[in-house]
Amino acid sequence: MAMLNRLGRLVWEAGGLPTLMDLFEDGSVDRQLVASVIRTSGEEGESLLLKLMRLHKNDKIRMATASVLSYRLPVNERDLEADLLLMDEYETDPSTMRPG
């Protein structure tokens, strides 16, 4: 479940929201964690959680929903930036490098 939390929109695109909703309703898995996965699945998950918070009769589901709606999501989770620094081979002294 924790791994799904890092997949972002891929959960929704793969059709995983109905399964997550079943787990959320059932309560056999930590509802806080399931709500977090639904939240990280993008705008679709957010709108689903908003509906649950307004309309669901189970207070435990509404509390788990309300606790994750404040999470901020990246605008585009697939747009990652990385800076690579290439060093000249003469700048490093092998005698000062640690093993491993």
Image: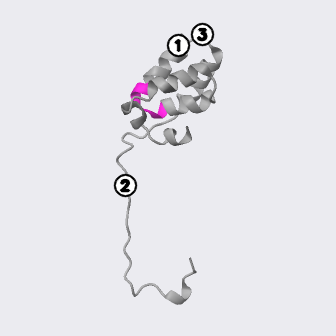
Q: Is residue 91 above or below residue 76?
A: below
Where, quadrant-wise, is the N terminus in this rendering?
top right
Residue 80 shown left or right of residue 63 in the figure: left
Of badges 2 and 3, the one in the foreground is 3
- Secondary structure, mark 1, is helix
Task: Quote the CA–CA distance across marks 1 and 2.
Answer: 37 Å
Residue 25 position, x and y percent, is 57, 19
The reply to whether dot 2 and dot 3 touch (C-beta < 8 Å) is: no
Residue shown at the point (52%, 16%) measured from the top left: 52
- Does the magenta run of residues contain 42? yes
Front-lying residue, 54 or 22: 22
Task: Quote the CA–CA distance across marks 2 and 3.
Answer: 43 Å
The amino acid at mark 3 is Lys
Of badges 1 and 3, the one in the foreground is 3
Task: Quote the CA–CA distance across marks 1 and 3.
Answer: 9 Å
Residue shown at the point (38%, 62%) measured from the top left: 83
Prevailing SS of the magenta stretch = helix
Mark 2 neighbour class, 10 Å CA radius: few under 14, some 14 to 19, many 20 or more: few
Residues rendered magenta in the picture: 39-46
Residue shown at the point (44%, 41%) measured from the top left: 7
Determine which residue is flagged by label 1.
Answer: 54
Mark 3 neighbour class, 10 Å CA radius: few under 14, some 14 to 19, many 20 or more: few
Determine which residue is flagged by label 2.
Answer: 81
Residue 92 position, x and y percent, is 45, 84
Residue 24 shown left or right of residue 46 in the figure: right
- Secondary structure, mark 2, is loop
Answer with the quarter of the image where residue 91 lies: bottom left
Nearest to N terminus: mark 2 or mark 3: 3
Q: Is residue 7 above or below residue 47?
A: below
The numbered disc on residue 57 is 3
The reply to whether dot 1 and dot 3 touch (C-beta < 8 Å) is: no
The amino acid at mark 1 is Arg
